[in-house]
Image (cartoon, grey):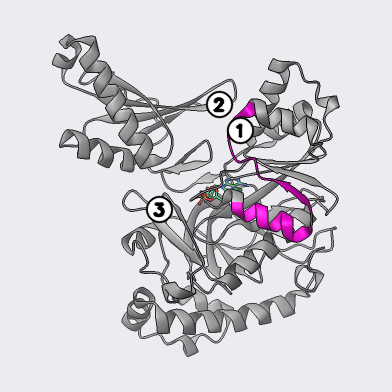
Amino acid sequence: MFESQYEAMPRAEIAQLQLERLQATLQRVYRNVKFYRQKFDRLGFLPEDLLSLDDLAKLPFTTKEDLSNSYPYGMFAVPLREVVRIHSSSGSAGNPMVVGYTSRDLRTWARLAARLMTAAGITKDDVVQITFHYGLMTGGFGVHYGAETLGASVIPTGTGNTFRQVQIMRDYRTTVLVATPSYALVIADKLAEIGVDPKELHLRIGLMGGEPWDDKRRQEIEGKLLCQTFDLYGLSEAMGPGVAGECVQRRGMHLNEDHFLPEIIDPDTGQPLPPGEIGELVITTLAKEAVPLIRFRTGDRCSLHYEPCPCGRTLARISRILGRTDEVVIVKGVNIFPQRVGQILAAIQGEIPIYQLVVSREGHQDILEIRVEVRESIFFDRMVAQRQLVNQLSHKLAQGIGVTPRVKLVEPNSISREEETSPLVVDRRSA
Ligand code: DLL
């Protein structure tokens, strides 16, 4: 274990530490974040009223919309001068969500990521190739500093240029591939395409996260890349990767409970559910300085388990993420709110047209098609005009959602609402 004093802490001590940290967090947000102060005042709740962990359930939830509404810095509990890093994520249908880190937050992040990498069996002898995006999203940097903290040799390739990824993997003798499950399969396809035998590689571990996957994909990745894979969970609002991850037992993901207090709620009623039941994961951060969160609704469906793990860690485990409670679709690891697409189209066209997102796979690549109903007359226009419109829409949408879609103009009343996964989305990937 990387930090056995926390990872194998007796349960009673974990609860005591959580309570102390929670009280301190409530004090901090009450003093420094108007959003929370107003919420607590409305309830007549003072931070010192929290006497046990159960009292947390008296407080209201924080949602993605709340974070978007406080764009950009409304949720920050420290002055900007103390913030040393800023990341951002899609947030909600409205503004993006901005998250900041103090230098202590960054050190914590690196340690928590290092814990989960150690749990997956990664050591300082490993050569770790990180294909997560390095940039505004949290994936790349989070794992990067975790791996460096471990003392592993890090290759920060970032996403894309799959041919080069394969060359590097073979020539630099990569032992750990860090990727979204779908990108791991894209890499596997590339191996086959250019005739590299996976036996030529030195890969032993695949650390996979950032998007939903299942055991079938796990077997496919392991069979094609000849490595053992481990699930890694996180979300930008809480930190990024580093929230939870599988140990070598691979029976759920250990959640770094000394930093994140989990609850599972019924997404419809908001009522807490007992351990083992599937519901929405709600997280309260316990030591974050820059952007603490109280009862944040992640939108992720899973269950929570407190049984001891044969690995010796006492930290609770969450199941695989089984889906979402909202309409977010994750395409190539990027979270997309379908309504955001409508807003972008409205900004170009003056009103929200009828539209639909169709997500599918070609080989192992996620493909996002956005169908937009347009006036019939458009189809009588010159091809050039049509193509210009498609290019314009696809460019603006790519800017707005972070994934380049294929835009398809369709005639009025042609979008079928029958096979939808949600009101605006058809997701054919699991078919
Ligand atoms: O995806 C952070 C991350 C990157 C975690 C890489 C792990 C690895 P966001 O872009 O804010 O942050 O997206 C967070 O992605 O609420 C889940 O819906 C989904 N997600 C992340 N990890 C997993 C996973 C990063 N292992 C959202 N399994 C989360 C299923 C996952 N879904």
- Quadrant where the image shows the N terminus: bottom right
* Label 1 CB-ligand 1 distance < 8 A: no
Q: Are marks 1 and 2 in contact (CB under 8 Å)?
A: yes
Residue 291, percent from left and from top = 47, 69
252 left or right, relative to 308: left
Please, what is the three-letter code of the amino acid marked with disc 3? Gly
Query: What are the residue bounds of the magenta stretch?
Result: 141-162
Identity of the residue drawn at 80% across and 51% down: 122
Q: Quadrant of residue 204?
A: top right
Residue underneath mark 1: 182
Q: Residues within 10 Å of mark 1 (few under 14, many from 20)?
A: many
Is residue 70 visible in the rendered image? The answer is yes
Residue underneath mark 2: 365
How far is disc 3 from disc 1 in space, using C-alphas?
A: 22 Å
Identity of the residue drawn at 39% across and 40% down: 401
Q: Secondary structure at mark 3?
A: loop
Q: Residues within 10 Å of mark 2 (few under 14, many from 20)?
A: some
Q: Residue furthest bottom?
A: 48
Classify 171 as above or below 44. above
Q: Nearer the viewer, residue 347 or 104?
A: 104
Residue underneath mark 3: 91
Residue 244, percent from left and from top = 66, 57
Please, what is the three-letter code of the amino acid marked with disc 1? Ser
Q: Nearer the viewer, residue 179 or 147?
A: 147
